[in-house]
Amino acid sequence: MPASASTIAALEPAVAAPPEGAGSATLKPETSAASEDGFVSLFNGHALSGWNGDPRVWSVKDGVLTGKDSVKKGEGSFLIWTNGTVADFDLRFSFRVPQANSGVAYRAKESEVRDLDVVRRSRSGVLGIQAHAVGKDAVVQFKDIRLKHLTQLAPVPEVEGLARSRQPALQAEPTSSAAQPTKTYRNPILEAPGAADPTVIRYQGKYYLYPTLDSQGYDVFVSDDLVHWDRKPKCYSDARGGVWAPDVFYNKRGDGRLYLYYTADNPNGGKLIGVAVSDDPLGPFQDKTTLANPAIDAHLFQDDEGALYLYYVDLAGGFKIVVQSMADPFTKKGAPNVVIRPTDPWEKKRGAVTEGPWMLKHDGVYYLMYSGSGADGPDYGIGYATAKSPLGPFTKHAGNPIAHRGSGIFGPGHHCVIAGPGGSLWMVYHQKESDRVGWDRFVAIDPLWFDSGGAIHVKTTRGTDEPVP
C-alpha cells in the first residue's frame, strides 16, 4: 500500500453480542488467538474470512485490512460482514481528508443509536462521520455504538482511499453466552443541588464543567466521560458577587491559554461581563478586563478560519442577544450587532427573554442556540436560529422550542454542546426541580443531533437510565 494513501481505518476492542432472540452469540472469529486484552481480530490471517468484498480492492495481511489507493464509493468499495452480529464496540478512524464531506461510514440494521454525527441516515441505519479538515490528518471515534447486525464497512462519497491500518480494523470479544450490560447514566448528572448554566470544555482528554452555583465564583467539576464528575475547588472568585453563567474558551490555536468569560454584579448597579485568564483549567483565573455592561451570558465562538465572535445578552432596553467581533479573546473589534430578540410567544411566557447563547456550525450553517422565557419558571426552554454568517442575519427555527417542559421535565435551558468520548454531540444544560417559580435547578446531559435536513433535535430526560456518551 503506498504510504501516501489517504484514509486509514481502525477499530478499538469490541464486544460481541447475540442476535435478538438467540441464546448465544453467533460471531465466531476465524482465528482463536486472542490479544492481551481478550479480544480477537475479525480481519485474520491473509484472507477476508467472514467478509464479502472485492479482492481487487481489499486485502488482508497479518490481520491488517488494506484498501486499494483511491478507493471510491461504488462497485467493490463495500466490505460486508456475513458472519453474525457485532455490538457495543468502540470505533476509531484515522485518515487524511482529501476534500470536504469526506469520511468513513458503516451501516447497521436496527441501529439503537440516534445521537451520532450522521453522514447519511435511512431506514437501514447508515451511520458515520464527516470530516472537513481538508488535507489534514483527523481522528474521530464512536464509543459504545450498540449496533445490531453490522452489515457494511465502507468509505462514503469522495473518500479517495482506505489505507493500511496499524491495528486490526475490527475486533470482537470471543463468543459469550450473554450480551454485555449496557452502561447508563441518569439525570441529575451532577451532585451539586442548585447548579445551573453549565459550560463544558475538553482539555487534554478530560472534561471540565463550570456552573453557576453560589454566586461567589465558579467551582470546577472534572470527568473522563461526562457522567462521573469530581468536584474541585473554585477556579475564580469575585467579591462583587452575582457570579453567573460562565463560558470558558481554550485558545488552542493561539496562545494556549484559557479564557473565562464571567457575569458579575456591577458595583454601580446591574450586571457586567468580564474576562479572566489562566494557564490551567482548574485556575486560578486572573481578572483581565470588562467587556460589556449592562450584560450577561457571554459565549466565545471560534470559526473554522480562526475568527472570534463573542455572543452575549445586552440588557439595555431588554433581553437581546448580540454578537461582537473580537480581535483576540479580550479585545473587541468594531461595534456589537443585535441578532436575536424575544419575539415568539414561547420566549415571552414569563418575561420577554432571549439569553444563554451557544453557537454551533454544521455543514457550513451557523446555528445560534439560545434559551427563552424567564429562567426561574417551568416554561424556560431552548430554541435556535440559523444564518449563513456568524454575524447574521438569523432566522428562527419554526419548530422552537426544541427543549421544553413536559413529561416531568421543567425549565430545560441555558446549555452548552460538547462532543462526547465517542464523538457524538451532547447537550449539557439545567432543569428545574419542579413547576414552582424559583431557582431550584440541577445539571443534566442528553443527546443532541442533526437530521438529514439539517434540523437540530434534542432529548431531555430525568430519573431514567439512558445509554452513556
Image: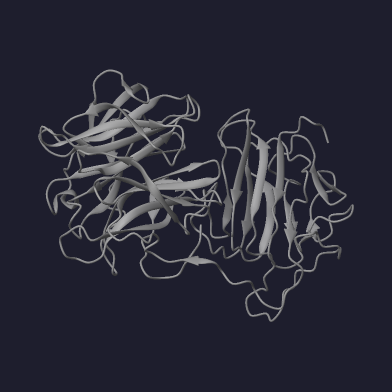
Q: Quadrant of residue 334?
A: top left
Q: Quadrant of residue 137?
A: top right
Nearer-the-camera pick, 321 or 7: 321
For the point 74% across and 39% down, the residue is 71
69 with respect to 273 (left or right): right
Q: Point out residue 139 in the picture as x, y percentages from the top left corner.
A: 62, 40
| Circle count | 0
361 with respect to 76 (left or right): left
Q: Point out residue 107 in the picture as x, y percentages from the top left corner.
A: 63, 56
Q: Point out residue 371 in the picture as x, y percentages from the top left corner.
A: 26, 47
Task: Tell me if I can see residue 340 in this picture.
Answer: no
For the point 75% across and 51% down, the residue is 169
Q: Point out residue 33 in the picture as x, y percentages from the top left corner.
A: 86, 62
214 with respect to 89 (left or right): left
Nearer-the-camera pick, 262 or 370: 262
123 with respect to 349 (left or right): right
Nearer-the-camera pick, 347 or 159: 347
